[in-house]
Amino acid sequence: MSDPRAATPTEIRKQGGARLVITWADGHSGTYAALYLRGSCPCAHCVDEVTGRRRVGPLQVVPDVELVKVSPVGNYAVQLDWSDGHRTGIYSFDYLRSICPCEICRPR
Amino acid sequence: MAVTERDVLDALRHIQDPDLKRDIVSLGFVRDVRVEGAVVRLEIRLTTPACPVKDQMQAEARRALEKLPGVREADVRMTSEVRGSAATDKTAIAGVKNLIAVGSGKGGVGKSTVAVNLALALSSSGARVGLLDADIYGPSLPIMMGLSQEGVQAVGERLIPPVAHGVRFLSMGFMAPGDQPLIWRGPMAHKALQQTLFGAEWGELDYLLIDLPPGTGDVHLTLVQSVALTGGVIVSTPQDVGLVISRKTLRMFQQTRVHLLGMVENMSYYLCPHCGERDDIFGHGGAEKAAASLDVPFLGAVPLDRRVREQADVGKPIVISDPESPAAVAYRDIAGKLAQQVSIRSFETPQVTIVEE
């Protein structure tokens, strides 16, 4: 990612509890479904700190999980609160861009 | 035929802010234009009182106006209003416009001495300045500021930072009883930082400088996660060893999206107190080279001068005690460049909006 704007969001829009829509400074935009985002939580509980293996993915969380709150973390990330009570995940902008689920970023 | 406000603005449109690279009219610096016959009065409101080109800009504006036909006299007042640059309001401290972290790769580079003198130099330019000592491993700032725990008052749960030499000051060390060393685990350091940042009445400040512990650790992480910093300054000595580690600090700033405002070279050269001769005992210029290779602004170099330490030890840092000394002049110059970088940043800080539907 050579363009620094690629990982700089201009708007983070929470659409109810169902999804997050992020618009990036380079014009790109991605829609993240709640279950996908909850299942991609980067915290030490969900990803084993030593092995790096994912312990909690989309299959380990309730399918109707909802996004409750989006809070900014410094200049570089957001913290997400979930309806299952989980809230330790700090999603950096770089990470969010790298897991963008849109068709351009994730070709089938 | 009398000049109009429009003529005045058109004449000033040719004057550029050298840092922002835009003309002072479109930047909105020109205020309160009044034409009274052959006299033009106006205000140029800069983004920092520490602006190094203030006098030059005033002279240029006056020249441009007096060239206008029908103008006999131009009264150009220079004022300033520091712009805030917090990325999101939620993580900023109420009333504080700019948060600047001062860090170093390792201990012993004189980071705290640089922090206190920069705070005093900014304050002497007319800015409202606060200084937070977050160096839990060796809090030396209280001595340099001549302040102790006893000076801290509290209103209810809120701490009131005491003032020395015009600068509001708190130390995380004040959160511990008496003169005990701070043997803190992460969560305690976290709590003390939160308390001194958000639990204190900092009031209205243009700049709040935060003196970080050396290296990269708990305090740094807590800081970058709790507030939107305007940016960071890295202090190093000319030696390469110091610089390799400074790069680590720099990388941590980059990973957490803290903008690098610049590097300062401390103990850059030795000034002999007897003959005034200069000696580059640590090899001068290392930080400047590193800053260039890392594409970070170089803010300046401070000489090694015995008076810097002596005066700091008795609570009168050199910017206050000997304002005409080479070190004090260097500090004022660096403070001006730092303020410029903060202004530049305030015009380019990306704004992230979080919308809830």
Image: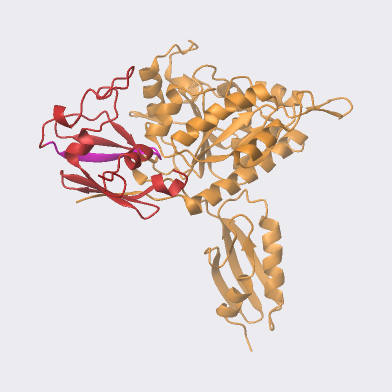
| Residue B257: x %, y % from top left | 45, 38
What residue do we see at 65% from left, 21% from top?
B241
- Above or below B347: residue B214: above
Q: Is B260 in front, or is B184?
A: B260
Colour displayed for chain A in the image of the structure: red
| Count of numbered circles on the image | 0
Which residue ends up furthest to the bottom in the rendered image?
B1
Residue A56 at x, y percent in the picture: 20, 25
Which sits in the foreground, B66 or A89?
A89
Q: In this view, does B345 lie above or below B304?
A: below
Front-lying residue, A57 or B220: A57
> The chain coloured orange carries which letter?
B
Question: Is residue B145 visible to the viewer in this orientation of the structure?
Answer: no
B267 horizontally vs B82: left or right: right
Quarter of the rendering occupied by the N terminus of chain B: bottom right
Q: Quadrant of residue B327?
A: top right
| Main secondary structure of the magenta stretch | strand
Q: Which residue lies furthest to the right in this view?
A: B275
Q: Give the range drawn in magenta.
A: A65-77
| Residue B176 position in % (x across, y down) | 43, 16
Is residue B136 one of those drawn in magenta? no
The location of residue B155, given as percent across then percent down, is: 36, 31
> Taking B199 as reference, is B205 left or right?
right
A75 drawn magenta:
yes
In this picture, residue B171 sits left or right of residue B225: right
